[in-house]
Amino acid sequence: MRKLVHRPRRLRRSEGVRNLVRETKLTAHDFVLPLFVSEKIRERQAIASMPGVFQLALAEVADEAQRAHDLGLQAVLLFGIPREKDEAASGASAENGIVQQAVRAIKGKCPGLVVMTDVCLCEYMSHGHCGVTRVDGDHFHVLNDESVELLVKTAVSHAAAGADFVAPSDMMDGRIGAIREALDANGFQDTGIMSYAAKFASAFYGPFREAAESPPQFGDRRSYQMDCANAQEALREVALDIEEGADIVLVKPALPYLDILWRVRERFGKPTAVYHVSGEFAMVKAGAEKGCFEERAAVLEIMTSLKRGGADLIVTYWARELAEWTRQ
Ligand code: PBG
């Protein structure tokens, strides 16, 4: 028999050896659970395209958050669905807006849980865009600086309600710096910013738009979200957000952008998050339902890949299940 010096399979011989040499391990602390809270409902409503994900009523959001914390999760990311939408996204920054009330309820019940809030205007704008729009004939523009003003007000109102981190997901230019300045000026030096720094215009947000009732009523988001073809531009976007004061930078979606995630983590060394988005979730659910693969194995493989690929933090609709699946 041929003598082999190297037999890498020695390190795969048994469960015990594999456990000893495993490089990437998942724990409940890696995951952030998105929660949708709606001002329009009195009890939870299923979201058709996202099996097992619900819109919650305000009255139940604190219990839901407490349950997540009890499972070992450290953070939730809140999205609000207001009763009324308008052209100025008034609900986004209202002191008694749905997210502001939800933050207070969660912090009242479960002060140790890290509460992050999505800062965006699309759920609150009657037209569903992430900023202020101006229509010129058959063209429409999303106005940058006017939008940033509203985003700043929204972020400050979330901080005032007690959010630990605000998470701007709109992709307007300069919003991180403007939000940092306003938070500091209002005494919220300790409120962090998790910036959706490299957010791509993606086909995979479809189910979310049903969950958050936020599809654009005309046009698309390609004048503000990034072109999926561009990696260098993503690095420039991340660099700007870090210069402007982002504490955590986020790449979104997840699996199709592993290369971006890796480069962002390697180049900047900042806490780096990734958002495994609704369409990615729905795809795996559909595959599992058809019997193509087992859901749990597929999800664990994807999450391990994201962490191996540079994610310190993973936003995922499977956070609760993962907290259980990764318990030793
Ligand atoms: C809002 C926002 C979106 C998502 C998170 N924040 C949708 C969008 O940009 O259209 C998507 C999340 C998901 O698909 O799970 N701006």
Image (spheres, rainbow, N blue to C red):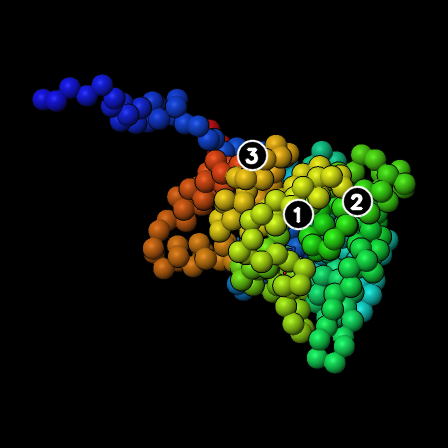
Q: Looking at the picture, tell me which residue is in the foreground, 114 or 69.
A: 114
Q: Is residue 193 left or right of residue 208?
A: right
Q: Judging from the image, what secondary structure is the residue with disc 1 in?
A: helix
Q: Quadrant of residue 7?
A: top left
Q: Is residue 283 left or right of residue 245?
A: left
Q: Give the residue at mark 3.
A: 266
Q: Amino acid at mark 1?
A: Glu
The x and y percentages for residue 195 are 69, 45
Q: Give the residue at mark 2.
A: 177
Q: Judging from the image, what secondary structure is the residue with disc 2 in?
A: helix
Local packing at callout 1 (Cα closer than 10 Å; few below 14, some 14-19, many 20+) is some
Q: Residue furthest bottom?
A: 137
Precedes in sequence: disc 3 or disc 1:
1
The x and y percentages for residue 96 are 84, 55
Q: Residue furthest left?
A: 1
How far, Cα to Cα, is label 3 from label 1? 15 Å
Q: Is residue 250 left or right of residue 87?
A: left
